[in-house]
Image (cartoon, rainbow, N blue to C red):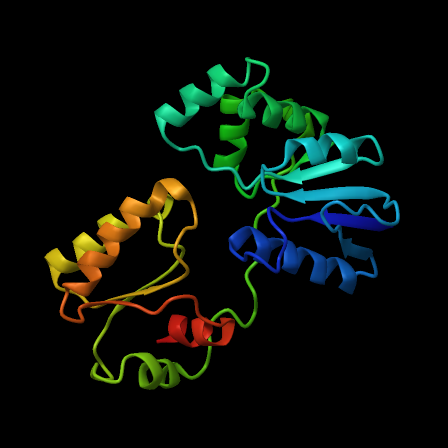
Amino acid sequence: MKVGVFTRMPLMFYSGGAEVQAEKTVEWLRRRNVEVHYVEYGAWGQKPDIFHFFGLCFPDLVKEAAARAPVVVSPIYNGGSLYEMAKTKLLRRFPFTVHHSQWRALCLAQCLMPNSLAEKRQLLCHWGVDEDKIRVVPNGVDESFIGKAPYRFREKFLPDLLPEERFVLSAARIEKNKNTLLLVKAALKMRFPLVLAGQMSFAKDEGTYIREVMDLVASSSGLVRYLGPLSREDLREGYAA
């Protein structure tokens, strides 16, 4: 079997949880002797037996892919608020809206693979998709997820903390969806050391939010630290620490 994989954005420009999920899926499919390749945007290349999309993005690409081969989608969808649910249920009915295009893309897929029962319920409630084509596929955990040398992380990033001093590590993008601002406020109120590791959101509407977060970090006298994006090796040792 040949599988063509689409990520939310070209990997050279962006990497987040969805991209890691795609990367690990590709890795383990190859271990099972499945021929897998990433499809370059704008260049379809050799026709695969199936296309796998990660993320609810680029519905026009899903439509074009579905004309070439069966499509499966890992939506990686999180529309938890009542507002988001109401907006999606309404706008998916109106042509020429992004939500309608995304709904059409979900309908074109032969299989939808949410990562949890909660995500499955959201797909059913928000998007009204056919339950029969949903298969819940939980994310796996890498065997090397937690490192074995936590002292390396402390020596490199937290040299002023005592070895027994505890801290909170948030490995995520700085954005509203991750609730970074409330976490920083909680750290300042409770006076616990907080380490933020991740890139800042590139979304235009997140600018004010990010500035508010970083202003609090700057005024925290070192209680809250922003390390930026970290390598996976540093993250593993950070989880251990």
Is residue 50 placed above or below 170 in the rendered structure? above
Decide if residue 41 is on the left or right side of residue 173.
Answer: right
Quadrant position of the C terminus in the picture? bottom left
Is residue 77 placed above or below 157 in the rendered structure? above
Is residue 106 placed above or below 179 in the rendered structure? above
Query: Residue drawn 59% across and 14% down?
Result: 95
Decide if residue 102 is on the left or right side of residue 31.
Answer: left
Query: Residue drawn 75% across and 50% down?
Result: 39
Q: Quadrant of residue 111?
A: top right
Residue nearest the viewer, comparing 124 with 51: 51
The picture places residue 227, in percent across and down from the top left corner, at 34, 69
- Any part of residue 179 in sight: no
**Total number of numbered discs in the rendering:** 0
The picture places residue 199, in percent across and down from the top left corner, at 41, 60
Decide if residue 239 is on the left or right side of residue 179.
Answer: right
Residue nearest the viewer, comparing 241 with 204: 204
Query: Residue drawn 78% across and 36% down?
Result: 65
The picture places residue 102, in percent across and down from the top left corner, at 60, 28
The picture places residue 78, in percent across and down from the top left corner, at 46, 37
